[in-house]
Image: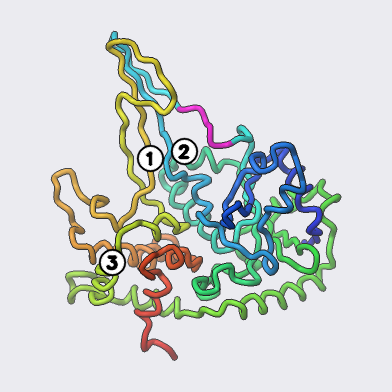
Amino acid sequence: MYYYLRREKLAGLLLHLSKEWSVLAPFRNSYGDVTLENLDSVAENGRAEEIASRLALGGRTDSAQLLSPPKEVFFPQSEILFQFSEKGNGEFAIEQPEGKDDPSGNKPKLLFGIKPCDYHALLMTGRFFLEDNTDFYYSTRANGSMVIIDSCIVPPEPEACFCSSAGTGPLMKRGDEYDIQLVEEGNGFIVDVASSRGEDFVSGLENFFKIADEKETARRLEEIRKEAVGNVELKVDFKGALEIMKESPEEGETGERLPAIYREIADRCIYCGACLYLCPTCTCFNVYDNSNFCSVLTLLEEGERAGERVRVWDGCVFSGYSREASGHNPRDDAYKRAERRYEHKLRYDPVVYGRSTCVGCGRCLTGCPVDIGMLKFIEEVTVGNEE
């Protein structure tokens, strides 16, 4: 069904939802960056005007991309997996750290205002962490969570966004796997409810959501969709790139794959990791132990030891990522690590997940200080492939 939500009711809606949900939404900070913040930390005293003034929501009037991808809500940049201690008598204990990342306590998380490309990315990271071998830490954070999507009518990063080519936006379409999508229209939003879970969510919220005419709203949504696709000026041959990557020979078969491009990327890359950390689907991580140290203050007596096991984001372009315990590194050459990154997104993930894990958000390009990104790579490998 379709509903309508007036913009002036947004702040009140978020405050109402925060009674049952840990609400995270895109807010603009004093530097102009848009970050995903918990509502309780933005409006400590429940001030609706503070929410309304900082909320960055809307496909036309306030189109903005999150500075950091929403994956960090469920997969933080750094997290303590457990703490361990050993008493002087040899007694050993392992404890889970007390959760301090959510000021709302143990409420399920509601990600309000996530862009379509980032929502597709969350589906991919969720499959990585929850299919086959379930990651306890990711599943604990994601349990019961819900996402409300904010469509893009105007691309937030016009020189980098190519979601229409990647098939991840600028609007969700019926048949996609989603619950609720907001589409800015007039002085408010068309509320596109696409699942029974979404219908359950809006039930009881008649003060905020008003039922809209089904036929007329569907017609208007199609017009907005065409407008939004036309607003995405960057068009690349995404499908062509996938075919080229799929059909190119493996390294060692008939020679190196796309060697000139990979070597050029490796020569220019300064290995800052921005593309990896900003990518909404990169899931590489490292795990290490901090011995004789705890982030939670611990008073140790003589003969006692304590520490913690920590998981942090890592990346396949770093020289130490694939280095083995023996010291051997199967990707000791920088171009091999560049090759790994692009093949991961465009060659192997489509086999595993049925689609590429590049969602066309453009963050890797906007964050790169030397102007390297998936967009530029796709453009280069498809040169001469135009119809």
Disc 1 is placed on an element classified as: strand
Which numbered tag is attached to residue 339?
3
Badge 1 or badge 2: first in the primary sequence: 2
User: Badge 1, how many Cα within 10 Å: few under 14, some, many 20+?
Assistant: some
The amino acid type found where label 1 is placed reads Arg
Q: Residue at x 44, y 41 (%)?
A: 135
Residue 167 lies left or right of residue 348; in this view the side is right
Magenta stretch holds residue 101:
yes
Q: Residue at x 63, y 66 (%)?
A: 172
Gap in angstroms between the C-alphas marked 1 and 2:
10 Å
Which residue is nearer to you in this view: 216 or 104? 104
Badge 3 or badge 1: first in the primary sequence: 1
Name of the residue lying farthest toward the top: 89
Q: From the image, give the main secondary structure of the stretch colored magenta.
A: loop
Judged by depth in the image, the label closer to the viewer, 1 or 2, is 1
Quadrant of the image containing the N terminus:
bottom right
Please determine whether, in this image, residue 37 is positioned above or below residue 88.
below
Residue 158 lies left or right of residue 338; in this view the side is right
Badge 3 or badge 2: first in the primary sequence: 2
Residue designated by label 1? 311
| Range of magenta residues | 97-102
Residue 253, position as x, y percentages in the image: 18, 72
Q: Quadrant of residue 65?
A: bottom right
The amino acid type found where label 3 is placed reads Glu
Q: Determine contact: label 1, label 2, CB under 8 Å.
A: yes
Which numbered tag is attached to residue 137?
2
Q: Residue at x 28, y 69 (%)?
A: 268
Residue 179, position as x, y percentages in the image: 66, 56
Q: Residue at x 21, y 69 (%)?
A: 251
User: Badge 3, how many Cα within 10 Å: few under 14, some, many 20+?
Assistant: many
